[in-house]
Image (tube, helix red, strand yellow):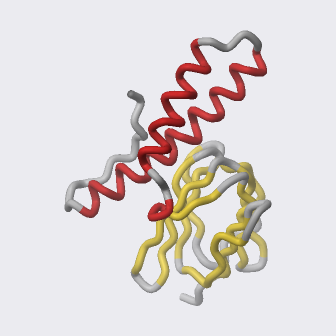
Amino acid sequence: MAPMKLEIVTAERLVYSEDVDVLVAPGIEGELGILPRHAPLLTVLQPGEIRVSKDGKETYMTVSGGFIEVMSNTVTILADTAERVEDIDAERAEAAFKRAQERISSAVSEMDLQRAMASLKRSQARIGVVTRRRRQQRGERPTQQPPTQ
């Protein structure tokens, strides 16, 4: 099957741009599997893991939200933030998770609570991706649930 073009873009940079065979992304209503020649689609992404398969090799990234558009065998992800799994600092993600938990418990307004919850979801996605990939490298079966600590 002919590959499709995938571009992952943030406001700061082009994160990924290659022809790929399969894309799995965290849609607002669950995981989206995208294959070449997929029907046109525009939807919201939630924080989570992106899995890309190209020539039998998988690449993993996280997004903190954004949009995905599928059009004419091209997939464009406009992400709030995006990182390759090897670029994620697990200790920094854990610290962000703890800070977000503290901010949730001390929120004084609805806006503070919403911001803290968004931060919590972003850090959970980053921690979850790193944890699953480390388990996979050790030969364990990766889990699909991010840590809840």
Q: Residue at x 25, y 54 (%)?
A: 141
Instruction: Give residue 15's position: percent from left, percent from top.
Output: 65, 70
Along the line of sight, which residue is nearer the eye, 102 or 65? Answer: 102
Asked where in the image residue 138 lies, by quadrant, the reply is bottom left
8 is higher (above) or lower (below) than 129 = below
The quadrant the N terminus occupies is bottom right
87 is higher (above) or lower (below) than 18 = above
- Please indicate, yes or no, whether residue 72 appears anywhere in the rendered image: yes
Q: Residue at x 66, y 75 (%)?
A: 6
Query: In this rendering, would 94 be left or right of 107?
Result: left
Residue at the farthest bottom position: 2
Instruction: Give residue 31's position: percent from left, percent from top.
Output: 55, 52
Along the line of sight, which residue is nearer the eye, 2 or 98? Answer: 98
Query: In this rendering, would 123 be left or right of 113?
Result: left
The quadrant the C terminus occupies is top left
Query: In this rendering, would 114 be left or right of 129?
Result: right
Query: In this rendering, would 28 be left or right of 94?
Result: right
Instruction: Give residue 58's position: percent from left, percent from top.
Output: 43, 73
- Please indicate, yes or no, whether residue 41 appears anywhere in the rendered image: no
Along the line of sight, which residue is nearer the eye, 41 or 136? Answer: 136
Instruction: Give residue 103's position: percent from left, percent from top.
Output: 61, 20
Q: Residue at x 52, y 64 (%)?
A: 84
